[in-house]
Amino acid sequence: MMCICCDKKISLLYPEIDLPNGKLEEDVVFNTKEKIQIDGSHDEEITVNAGSKMWNDGLVHKVSAGYGSCHDGDEFIIAICDDCIKKKKLTGNIAYVNNYMGYSLPGDEDYEKSRIAWRRYNRIDDILDDSNEETQ
């Protein structure tokens, strides 16, 4: 996968595990079913997606469009590299809200900095939109 912002290559962290028997990265991105062996006795099919894999130097995950988008209901796999995450978080283009592994809570420094950057970015956009409407 390539970063949606800068086109940096984001590759699987453990290709030897995630790409067995000639499997391609394309299969990881586009396939949603995978067979695993349970207790050495039988195969079971599980649902997976690219976001359930570990990726090197960035994140790869599924996003879905809600009502109001011309892509209502569409789902996409996107990638963004760690460098772009850091930059976009500082500018308020993306919002850091939590660490799902419990390393942060609302009110911590990263959360508060992200919230301030997000407010600044969005209020500037609102001000610019308002001034453009006034000049028309």
Image (cartoon, rainbow, N blue to C red):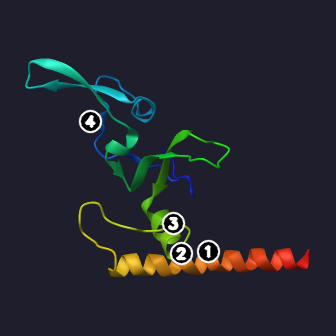
In depth, the one of 122 and 2 nearer the eye is 122
Q: Which tag, 1 or 4, sits closer to the chain's start? A: 4
Question: Given the image, on which type of amino acid does mark 4 rest?
Answer: Glu
**Dot 2 lies on which element?**
helix
Q: Quadrant of residue 36?
A: top left
In depth, the one of 69 and 128 nearer the eye is 69
Neighbours of disc 1 within 10 Å: few (<14), some (14-19), many (20+): some
Label 2 vs label 1: CA separation?
Answer: 6 Å
Q: Position of residue 76 (x, y in %)?
A: 52, 41
Neighbours of disc 3 within 10 Å: few (<14), some (14-19), many (20+): some
Question: Given the image, on which type of amino acid does mark 1 rest?
Answer: Asn
Q: Are marks 2 and 1 in contact (CB under 8 Å)?
A: yes
**Dot 4 lies on which element?**
helix
Residue on which disc 1 sits: 122
- Numbered circle sitting on residue 94: 3
Apparent side of residue 69 relative to residue 96 in the rendered image (left or right): right
Neighbours of disc 4 within 10 Å: few (<14), some (14-19), many (20+): few
Q: Position of residue 41 (x, y in %)?
A: 9, 18
- Numbered circle sitting on residue 104: none
Apparent side of residue 101 relative to residue 120 in the rendered image (left or right): left
Label 1 vs label 4: CA separation?
Answer: 43 Å
Residue on which disc 4 sits: 16
Rendered position, 28 above or below 43: below
Q: Position of residue 80 (x, y in %)?
A: 48, 55
Who's the residue at 43% across and 81% down the image?
A: 113
Rendered position, 41 above or below 123: above
